[in-house]
Image (cartoon, helix red, strand yellow):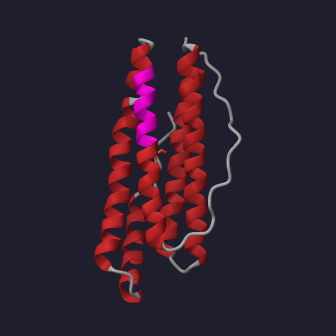
Amino acid sequence: MLKEKVQIALNKQIELEAYSSQLYLSMASWAEKNGFNGSSQFLYVHADEERIHMLKLFHYINDREGHAIVPALQQPPFNFESIKAIFQEILTHEKMISESINNLVGICVDEKDFTTQNFLQWYVSEQIEEENMAKTNLDKLILLGDDKATMYMFDKDMSALSLLSTAPPTAK
Ligand code: OFO
């Protein structure tokens, strides 16, 4: 059975993962409206992945006799300065998520909930990939500059990348 403090922190993480999904969805919509079809494809797929991150927590809480709560969500931004601004925001966001996961692991250690600590290792590893994905794409954008031809190349790259990650991992 989950301790109260752990359950509250896990439900808070559900809220963050659900917000992440909405944020990527909003970014995907902006990219689609502004002609970045490859980037939007990538961002739509990522929005689905964030939902899976949320669902994994959902099932875990309920499997441990807790109660996973559907959170009310804040509206994400829907206007962005550029595709580079989007990837800058993704990197900042993913760093915040990593910090939140680390705090969550800290709570589990304090509460001696080593089962949940073990469950959270998937998220610890995932955050290495998430931050790396954001940083790699941002570095690419900085390197390429922002003329139309290089933006087109970047967007084609993003389309190829989205095809590699179209199979979302299962929620359990
Ligand atoms: Fe982007 O990893 Fe979940 O939130």
In the figure, is residue 82 to the left or right of 110? right
Q: Is residue 24 above or below residue 72?
A: below
- Quadrant in the picture for residue 47: bottom right
Q: Nearer the viewer, residue 96 or 133?
A: 96
Labels in figure, total: 0
Identified at 32% across, 53% down, the residue is 132
The answer to whether residue 48 is seen in the rendering is yes
Residue 160, how many percent across, how many down? 38, 69
Identified at 47% across, 72% down, the residue is 83
Q: Is residue 132 above or below residue 42?
A: above
Residue 109, how many percent across, how many down? 39, 17
Identified at 41% across, 83% down, the residue is 152
Residue 58, how many percent across, how many down? 58, 31
In the figure, is residue 135 to the left or right of 8? left
Q: Is residue 89 magenta?
A: no
In the figure, is residue 8 to the left or right of 69? left
- Quadrant in the picture for residue 122: top left
Identified at 41% across, 15% down, the residue is 110
Q: Is residue 101 magenta?
A: yes
Q: Residue furthest right?
A: 72
Q: Is residue 7 above or below residue 150?
A: above
The rendered magenta stretch, by its main secondary structure, is classed as: helix
Residue stretch in magenta: 97-107
The answer to whether residue 116 is seen in the rendering is no
Q: Is residue 61 above or below residue 166?
A: above
Of the 4 image quadrants, the one containing the N terminus is top right
Residue 82, how many percent across, how many down? 50, 74
Q: Nearer the viewer, residue 9 or 39?
A: 9
